[in-house]
Image: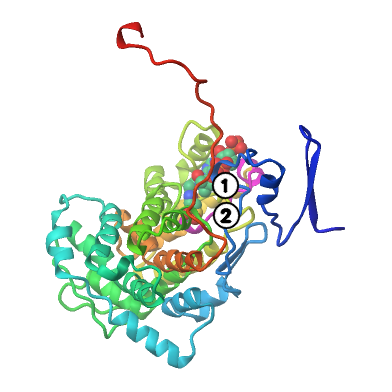
């Protein structure tokens, strides 16, 4: 069977045959048929907008790999910083490279005092931490003259380091501001996840349980990248205009903020709290199915139509955390919801399974994070995924400024009517 596709334009009889490689054929073929012919593909459901060698995802088989390494192995054996290096450089670091990488990240964790004193202090007292983070990421770029120098590899590497190292500092700062507590400076003697937990919770003596530190690191690994999701696409679209990486990452974070994307874990916990008790689960499921209520948050995925491998790891991590913190009382409702949905034809037929957000919120809550911080916790590790894609985009000769076309459905030409004639 030839690995080609043949398309005939029945209006003209013109035919073209083009190769199919990796399940993809070039849309340029359509241009060859007729430069004024476009493909209508809302939400890019059938469009591969780029080539990428970072993350592999097979939604039907429930497979997720970073640079070829299965997510299960990375979650069990690796650390977030090692994974960050892998995503950015394509290979796991050697012992020597890892020492240097850790040192470099650790020594970029501090942020300019004015970020806190002038910028963050200017927010309203009840500002949402994710809204604060989105604007803080963009504002951070204004502190670095060299941020716009995206053609220099040296400058790109520096900004990447800064964004990865400073994202936990910004996140913790937004939280501490929102609860009126003094800011805790980064502690360069701590690991990446421990430093973040310390900046979040330190009041007087604070000791981090190594099991919780590890759980935080695993959550960071699981959220580090997920190929061309909404936020990463925003990063690529804005980055394609050669905006600086801070501005592009702020756009990506804005996309992540939405409840259908990174905001879903917050929505899950609110939903579980609203359901209130196991007895109310059947009625809630009926309401979801009837379409009169909300969706079952934390269920379903655009790509995973079997199971989300991150959800399996997160469920196990949840139990590890609950051993230290005690069980989150919402867990029983979540388990009952999962059991009910997975045996209901509505969800089975539509291939709706728990996604990464279904259990992550319960862990975050057990760790003490308020729901408003959940998307922020997603944004910290996803920063490296955004940057890996940004770097790949800038080195890809096929890429240009993103500029899709449209199917115009508006009025035909008509003449302007004077105000009195309308
Ligand atoms: N609860 C109830 N019904 C659902 C759900 C849900 N969570 N998700 C999809 N459906 C139904 C939907 O109503 C539709 O039914 P019908 O064919 O009868 O109209 C069908 O399933 C297909 O849904 P869709 O909206 O066309 O699917 P999509 O691929 O556009 O949406 C999704 C994917 C993740 C936005 C969606 O499943 C959803 O809204 N889930 C809840 C929010 C959520 O958990 N988001 C986190 C996603 S994972 C984290 C991330 O990567 O950001």
Write down the residue under mark 2. Answer: 49
Whether 265 is drawn above or below 148: the answer is: above
Q: Residue at x 39, y 16 (%)?
A: 416
From the top left corner, tell me how far across and down residue 268 is, in percent.
42, 50
The mark found on residue 309 in the picture is none
**Magenta stretch contains residue 207:** no
In the orientation shown, which residue stands out farthest toward the bottom?
Answer: 96
Residue 113: quadrant of the picture: bottom left
Left or right: 161 in relation to 38: left
Residue depicted at 27% across the width and 55% down the height? 135
Instruction: Give the magenta range.
Output: 345-357
Number of residues whose C-alpha sits closer than 10 Å to that of mark 2, classed few (under 14), some (14–19) or many (20 or more)? few
Label 1 near ligand 1 (CB < 8 Å): no
Disc ID at residue 44:
1
The spot of residue 190 in percent (x, y) is: 29, 83
Where's the C terminus, which quadrant?
A: top left
Q: In the rendered structure, are the residues bearing label 2 and label 1 in contact, judged by CB atoms less than 8 Å apart?
A: yes
Q: Residue furthest top?
A: 421
Q: Nearer the viewer, residue 24 or 183?
A: 24
């Amino acid at each position: 069977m030839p690995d080609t596709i043949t398309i005939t334009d029945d209006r003209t009889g013109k035919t073209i045959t083009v190769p199919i490689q990796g399940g993809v054929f070039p849309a340029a073929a359509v241009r060859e048929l007729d430069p004024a012919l476009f493909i209508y593909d809302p939400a890019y459901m059938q469009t591969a907008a780029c080539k990428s060698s970072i993350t592999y995802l097979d939604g039907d088989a429930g497979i997720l790999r970073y640079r070829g390494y299965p997510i299960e192995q990375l979650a069990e054996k690796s650390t977030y910083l090692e994974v960050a290096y892998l995503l950015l450089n394509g290979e796991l670091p050697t012992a020597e490279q890892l020492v240097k990488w850790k040192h470099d990240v650790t020594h970029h964790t501090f942020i300019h005092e004015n970020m806190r004193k002038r910028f963050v202090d200017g927010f309203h007292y009840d500002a949402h931490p994710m809204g604060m983070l989105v604007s803080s990421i963009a504002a951070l770029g204004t502190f670095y003259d060299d941020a716009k120098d995206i053609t220099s590899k040296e400058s790109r590497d520096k900004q990447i380091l800064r964004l990865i190292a400073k994202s936990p500092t910004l996140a913790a700062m937004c939280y501490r501001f929102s609860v009126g507590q003094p800011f805790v400076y980064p502690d360069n003697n701590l690991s990446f996840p421990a430093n973040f937990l310390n900046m979040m919770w330190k009041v007087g003596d604070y000791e981090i349980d190594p099991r919780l530190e590890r759980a935080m690191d695993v959550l960071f690994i699981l959220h580090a990248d997920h190929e061309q999701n909404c936020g990463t696409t925003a990063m690529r679209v804005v980055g394609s205009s050669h905006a600086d990486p801070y501005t592009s990452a702020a756009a990506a974070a804005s996309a992540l903020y939405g409840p259908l994307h990174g905001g879903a874990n917050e929505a899950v916990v609110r939903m579980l709290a609203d359901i209130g008790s196991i007895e109310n689960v059947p009625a809630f499921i009926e309401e979801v199915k009837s379409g009169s209520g909300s969706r079952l948050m934390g269920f379903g995925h655009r790509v995973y139509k079997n199971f989300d491998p991150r959800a399996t790891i997160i469920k196990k991590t949840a139990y590890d955390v609950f051993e230290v913190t005690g069980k989150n009382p919402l867990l029983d409702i979540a388990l009952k919801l999962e059991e009910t949905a997975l045996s209901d034809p509505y969800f089975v037929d539509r291939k709706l399974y728990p996604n990464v957000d279904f259990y992550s919120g319960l862990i975050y809550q057990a760790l003490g994070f308020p729901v408003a911080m959940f998307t922020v916790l997603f944004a910290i590790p996803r920063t490296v995924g955004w940057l890996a894609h940004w770097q790949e985009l800038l080195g890809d000769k096929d890429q240009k400024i993103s500029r899709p076309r449209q199917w115009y459905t508006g009025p035909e030409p008509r003449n302007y009517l004077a105000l009195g004639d309308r």
